Image: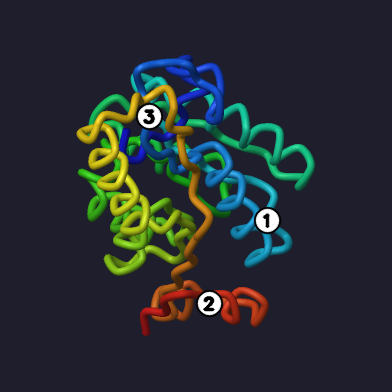
Amino acid sequence: MLPLGDPVGTGLVPSLANHSTNLTGTTNLAPQMMVKGLELLKETLPRLSRVLVLTYPRDPISRGQITALQGAARSLGVELLVSDIDRAEDLAPAFAAGRKNAVEGVLVTVESIFQVNRDLIVELARANALPGVFSEVTFVRAGGLLSYDSDRQLLMTRSADFVDKVLKGVLPRDLPIEQPTVFTIAINKGTARALGITIPQSILARADEVVE
């Protein structure tokens, strides 16, 4: 696995440490990352009360992310408008529904359909004047406001180490699944200016990449 979103939540393994299966590798802890992303958006916009969440329910990792977000939203005093996306054509209507329901931000879960449609999502967020938090820095480089992500390059490197060990005879069940220890924040200051948002110094100080 390199890096899988939620191997425990999707039932592939009973735990990360003692899984006793023929699977091993890395996970990016998608549900926890989404919660951090929502917290980041709330820290940026303290008055935030309603957020559009785009998710792809066909992917098994979607459910765990939404469950985690719903729990976090309650504690943050934020209402979620969850929109199930099945294909690219569903994106524009989802943003339109968000505008109709007066959402103040957008959060996109980890599924690959959103990575494939990155530019369209960023454009729709811009057209609807919605600050967005994404799970990959590439969204920020394309014009999205914020991203919160695990260090994917590090996880890929660790996955190569797993392959090396297995090829040398180590059994997968004897290799605990590794979770990320390094996370990154990226900010697009040009997008913030266009939206009339001042990024708090508390976030700027933690940013790993700032796009001007």
Q: Position of residue 138 (x, y in %)?
A: 29, 61
Q: Residue at x 46, y 34 (%)?
A: 177
173 left or right, relative to 113: right
Q: Position of residue 142 (x, y in %)?
A: 27, 65
- Nearest the eye: 183 or 25: 25
Cα separation, mark 1 vs mark 2, equals: 15 Å
Q: Rate crowding at label 1 as few (under 14), some (14 to 19) or many (20 or more) other CA atoms within 10 Å.
A: some
Q: Earlier in the sequence, mark 1 or mark 2?
A: 1
- In this view, the mark in front (3 or 2): 3
Q: Residue at x 34, y 35 (%)?
A: 111
Q: Based on the displayed image, in which of its 4 quarters is residue 17 positioned?
A: top right
Residue type pointed to by label 2? Gly
Q: Secondary structure at mark 1?
A: loop
- Nearest the eye: 148 or 98: 148
Residue type pointed to by label 3? Thr
Q: Position of residue 112 (x, y in %)?
A: 28, 37
Q: Which residue is mark 3?
A: 24
- Nearest the eye: 33 or 125: 33
Colouring mode (rainbow / by chain / secondary structure / one colour): rainbow
Residue type pointed to by label 1? Leu
Q: Based on the displayed image, in which of its 4 quarters is residue 42 positioned?
A: bottom right
Cα separation, mark 3 vs mark 1, equals: 39 Å
Q: Which residue is mark 1?
A: 48
Q: In the rendering, which numbered label is found on residue 196?
A: 2
Q: Rate crowding at label 2 as few (under 14), some (14 to 19) or many (20 or more) other CA atoms within 10 Å.
A: few
Q: In the rendering, which numbered label is found on residue 201?
A: none
